[in-house]
Image (spheres, helix red, strand yellow):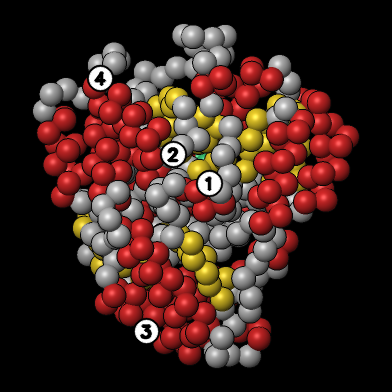
């Protein structure tokens, strides 16, 4: 038995499914999850000592790669002065100023510890601000695991074939209206019928939890226009896309000013930090200023703030996103070229935005949840395992986007393409 297998067997004794977050269990791809012992730059090592090029990056946060020296230095220095105070610290002021400076839509921002907390709190705030209950979300979008958002969601729910969760009261789910992504007519119809009851529309502005699906220009424009016309709060959930697709996130690429934005992953540089923020008029409804309650023992934790600040400062260096985007695009273009040399049923396709990419076992890139669901999942699973064998760690699910970090170099991309070509030849 390998060390990974032994650890997974032991883990299942006292941890449900052996993991602390479902997709880690390799449930949909099968086989044994890798237990990692070390990460450095673009690479991770598992418990059996095998090295992999990592395209998961802790599901997005590690945009600088593993154990980046500036992040390690900032966290170490901060820890020496104490780990947590439950009282304000200067770092929180610094990161709030920086976030509001980087993202023009943020008048004020509140720090929390996970993306789930950010979206859950943003929705409560939108409901408190508007005095309305209904929420629009889109099929295949994942916004964390708060009750009202676990309805037809993406990520692990799609991976395990059950897009809604048991334990969500019907009354709560009834206030969540789920619409197809990229469907302007469906959106217009709901606003025409129920516009005055809708508190908020929450969206992954570039979807990354049903694999990578890009929004159409018309869809992006319609969401802004309809929420504005009907007095609903437009929430851009940029937990994944925030500082991952560009310096001004997806909203910068779209030229849209959302009312509220949720951030996570990259903002914490690998430690538990997330945030939600937006218009002052809305944010001022939050406690202690206003009637909407929201709090957290470890919110704005000094170590997480230090890691976040070091990460944000690094990605503001001139040329950072140009280089990251070019490398990610080289990977996606290369995979597409390699993947298109087969008969249609064997083809793979790929695309990228900034440092985020999607690989699909289908001849063309998908534009909807339905098209993603039509991709060849068993083929993806075979591709995933063969790539793992070649030392390339992709997300263990056909429904997750992948991530390139600033630590990946041209050789890593070339090796990955070489491995993919060999794998597809074996699979053909
Ligand atoms: N929103 C989006 C778009 C996400 O991708 C995720 C996590 O993957 C979340 C929210 C939830 O974040 P967390 O896992 O930190 O709770």
Identified at 62% across, 43% down, the residue is 203
Q: Which residue matches tag 2? A: 103
Quadrant into which the N terminus falls? bottom left
Of residue 102 and residue 1, the one placed in the foreground of this image is 102
Disc 2 vs disc 3: which is toward the camera? 2
SS state under label 2: loop
| Left or right: 419 in relation to 89 | right
In x, y percent, where is residue 345?
A: 66, 84
- Say if disc 2 is inside 8 Å of ligand 1: no
- Other residues around mark 3 within 10 Å, as few (<14) / some (14–19) / many (≥20): some
Q: Which residue matches tag 4? A: 89
In x, y percent, where is residue 320?
A: 30, 58
Of residue 221 and residue 186, the one placed in the foreground of this image is 221
- Other residues around mark 4 within 10 Å, as few (<14) / some (14–19) / many (≥20): some
Q: Distance between the residues labelled 2 and 3?
A: 38 Å
| Left or right: 46 in relation to 279 | left
Q: Distance between the residues labelled 3 and 1?
A: 35 Å
| Residue 200 in sight from this viewpoint | yes
- Among numbered discs 2 and 3, the one appearing first in the sequence: 2
- Among numbered discs 1 and 4, the one appearing first in the sequence: 4
Rendered view: 94 above or below 345: above
Disc 1 vs disc 4: which is toward the camera? 1
- Among numbered discs 2 and 1, the one appearing first in the sequence: 2
- Among numbered discs 3 and 1, the one appearing first in the sequence: 1
Q: Which residue matches tag 1? A: 251
Q: Marks 1 and 2: in contact by CB < 8 Å? A: yes
- Other residues around mark 1 within 10 Å, as few (<14) / some (14–19) / many (≥20): many
| Left or right: 178 in relation to 203 | right
Identified at 26% across, 67% down, the residue is 51
- Among numbered discs 2 and 4, the one appearing first in the sequence: 4
């Amino acid at each position: 038995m390998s060390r990974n297998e032994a650890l997974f067997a032991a883990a299942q004794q006292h941890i449900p499914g052996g993991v602390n977050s479902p997709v880690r269990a390799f449930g949909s791809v099968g086989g044994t999850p890798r237990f990692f012992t070390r990460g450095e730059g673009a690479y991770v090592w598992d418990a059996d000592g095998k090295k992999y090029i990592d395209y998961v990056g802790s599901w997005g946060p590690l945009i600088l790669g593993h154990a980046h020296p500036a992040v390690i230095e900032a966290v170490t220095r901060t820890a020496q002065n104490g780990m947590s105070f439950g009282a304000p610290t200067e770092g929180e002021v610094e990161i709030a100023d920086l976030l509001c400076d980087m993202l023009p839509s943020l008048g004020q921002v509140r720090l929390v510890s996970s993306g789930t907390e950010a979206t859950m709190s943003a929705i409560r705030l939108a409901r408190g601000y508007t005095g309305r209950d209904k929420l629009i979300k889109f099929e295949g979008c994942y916004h964390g695991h708060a009750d009202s958002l676990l309805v037809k969601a993406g990520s692990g729910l799609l991976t395990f074939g059950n897009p809604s969760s048991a334990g969500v009261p019907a009354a709560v789910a009834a206030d969540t209206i789920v619409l197809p992504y990229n469907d302007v007519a469906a959106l217009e119809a709901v606003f025409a019928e129920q516009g005055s009851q809708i508190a908020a529309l929450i969206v992954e502005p570039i979807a990354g939890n049903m694999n990578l699906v890009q929004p159409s220009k018309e869809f992006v424009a319609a969401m802004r226009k309809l929420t504005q016309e009907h007095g609903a709060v437009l929430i851009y959930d940029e937990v994944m896309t925030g500082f991952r697709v560009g310096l001004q996130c997806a909203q910068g690429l779209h030229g849209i000013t959302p009312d509220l934005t949720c951030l996570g992953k990259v903002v914490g540089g690998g430690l538990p930090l997330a945030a939600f923020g937006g218009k002052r008029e809305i944010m001022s409804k939050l406690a202690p200023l206003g009637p909407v309650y929201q709090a957290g023992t470890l919110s704005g934790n000094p170590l997480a703030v230090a890691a976040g600040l070091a990460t944000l400062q690094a990605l503001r260096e001139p040329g950072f996103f140009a280089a990251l985007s070019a490398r990610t695009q080289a990977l996606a273009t290369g995979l597409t070229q390699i993947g298109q040399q087969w008969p249609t049923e064997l083809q793979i396709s790929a695309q990228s935005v900034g440092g985020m990419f999607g690989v699909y076992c289908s001849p063309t890139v998908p534009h909807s949840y339905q098209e993603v669901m039509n991709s060849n999942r068993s083929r993806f699973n075979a591709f995933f395992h063969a790539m793992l064998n070649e030392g390339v760690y992709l997300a263990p699910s056909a429904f997750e986007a992948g991530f390139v970090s600033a630590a990946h170099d041209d050789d890593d991309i070339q090796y990955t393409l070489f491995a993919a070509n060999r794998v597809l030849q074996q699979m053909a």
